[in-house]
Image (cartoon, rainbow, N blue to C red):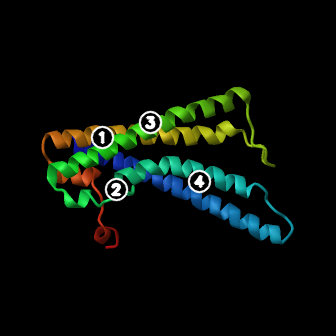
Amino acid sequence: MAIVILHHLRRINRVIAMIIGAALLLCAGYVVADIVLRRAGMPLRGGEDIAGYAMAIATSWGMAYALLELGHVRIDILRSRLAGRLRATLDLIALLALAGTVSMIALRAWPVLERSILMGSRSNSALQTPLAWVQAPWFTGWVWFALVAWITFLCALSLVLIRDEKAVEAAIGMQNEAEVHS
């Protein structure tokens, strides 16, 4: 069951990654157009703002994708010398710390969004963007990451408890240097 849940989460996150990637490409196109038109004396304005917003949103949503694709960086010196249950235990501890940290980030991000909604805050740039428009998807990305981290932790814990070390490694292990470059 845990493997099925993780498989579905990976599929959802791949779709999200494609959407975010397309949004980043559109953002890059806008910035390039702004630069070209600036040279012609007709700037589009707001490219810096849009790029910053896109990066914040892409980062918050991209973290869950990176987690399930084993893309988060960990220091491997101790882990690589351990095997089986000890390695899985370290992986679980790392995932628990990540889930807890990201949950705190999501909890702390809500007051930022709430304040922008209540005050009708706008950016102090030429675009005067309502900040809630940007902060809502940013906040939702952090909540999604926290949710994915906790679900992944629970799935990995169940795999550890049934002693399926191969599945634990596939779910929350690390890619080694050879796997990354092949």
SS category of the residue bearing label 2: loop
Amino acid beneath label 2: Leu
Q: Residue 65 appears at what percent x and percent y?
A: 41, 51
Answer above or below: position of 141 versus 49: above
Disc 4 crowd, CA 10 A, few/some/many (<14, 14-19, 20+): some
Residue matched to label 2:
70
Q: Given contact means CB atoms under 8 Å apart, are the residues at marks 3 and 4 in contact? A: no
Q: Residue 52 appears at what percent x and percent y?
A: 65, 53
Residue matched to label 3:
103
Disc 1 crowd, CA 10 A, few/some/many (<14, 14-19, 20+): many
Task: Give whichever of discs 1 and 4 has the lower sequence position.
Answer: 4
Q: Relative to 63, is 177 on the left or the right?
A: left
SS category of the residue bearing label 4: helix
Q: Residue 119 appears at what percent x and percent y?
A: 73, 28
At a point 32% along the width and 46% down the height, the residue shown is 94
Residue 16 seen anywhere in this rendered image of the structure = no
Q: Residue 104 appears at what percent x and percent y?
A: 47, 35
Task: Give whichever of discs 2 and 4 has the lower sequence position.
Answer: 4
Answer above or below: position of 177 versus 144: below
Distance from Cα at disc 3 to Cα at disc 2: 19 Å
Task: Give whichever of discs 3 and 2 has the lower sequence position.
Answer: 2
Q: Relative to 21, is 45 on the left or the right?
A: right
Quadrant the C terminus occupies: bottom left
Residue matched to label 1:
153
At a point 27% along the width and 37% down the height, the residue shown is 154
At a point 64% along the width and 49% down the height, the residue shown is 53
Residue furthest right as drawn: 41
SS category of the residue bearing label 3: helix
Amino acid beneath label 3: Ser
Distance from Cα at disc 3 to Cα at disc 4: 20 Å
Amino acid beneath label 1: Phe
Residue matched to label 4:
55
